[in-house]
Amino acid sequence: NKTNPSFYAPQIMNVISMAGTARGGLALSPYEVSKTAAEAFTDVLRLEMKAWGVNVVDINPSFHTTPLTTNVYDRLKEE
């Protein structure tokens, strides 16, 4: 709604991952920890930037098959 002043407020958008909100991915703990840290950073930044009227949001795309996630269980068995 362009009549709402917050429509024009500056925004910071962090694109993170669902891995920052989910737990239990075998062999993906370094990845999950980094995404959880990004979530925590976004939460703190949101609180700090509120005083200046800056909106801080996080976007968490759903799971996608990538080379990182493909056959993770099979790769563990090989090691």
Image (spheres, helix red, strand yellow):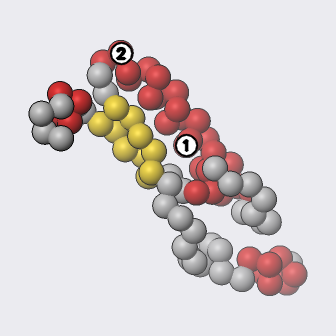
Q: Using the rendered image of the protein, determine whether residue 41 is visible from the camera's viewpoint.
A: yes
Q: Is residue 34 visible?
A: no
Foreground tag (2 vs 1):
2
Q: What's the distance in space between the residues labelled 2 and 1, CA to CA?
A: 21 Å
Q: Earlier in the sequence, mark 2 or mark 1?
A: 1
Q: Nearer the viewer, residue 26 or 23?
A: 23
Percent position of residue 9, x then y: 22, 31
In this rendered view, identify the residue nearer to me: 8 or 52. 8
Residue in view at x 53 percent, y 64 percent: 62
**Dot 2 and dot 1 residues touching (CB under 8 Å):** no
Residue 56: image x %, image y %?
39, 35
Quadrant placement of the C terminus: bottom right
Answer above or below: position of 39 versus 43: below
At x 52%, y 27%, the residue is 44
User: Against 75, is 28 above or below?
Assistant: above
Q: Is residue 60 left or right of residue 72?
A: left
Instruction: Assess disc 1: are there few (<14), some (14-19) or many (≥20) residues with their C-alpha within 10 Å of its C-alpha.
Output: some
Residue 73 screen position, x and y as percent: 80, 78
Mark 2 surroundings within 10 Å by alpha-carbon count, few (fewer than 14), some (14 through 19), many (20 or more): few
74, above or below 47, in the image: below
Kind of residue at badge 2 = Ala
The structure residue drawn at horizontal position 47% and vertical position 23%, both measured from the top left corner, is: 47
Please name the residue that numbered disc 1 is placed on.
38
Residue 37 lies in what quarter of the image?
A: top right
Q: Residue at x 29, y 22 (%)?
A: 53
Q: What label sits on residue 51 in the rendered view?
A: 2
Q: Which three-letter amino acid code belongs to the residue tagged 1?
A: Ala
Q: In terms of secondary structure, where does tag 1 sit?
A: helix
Name the element at disc 2. Answer: helix
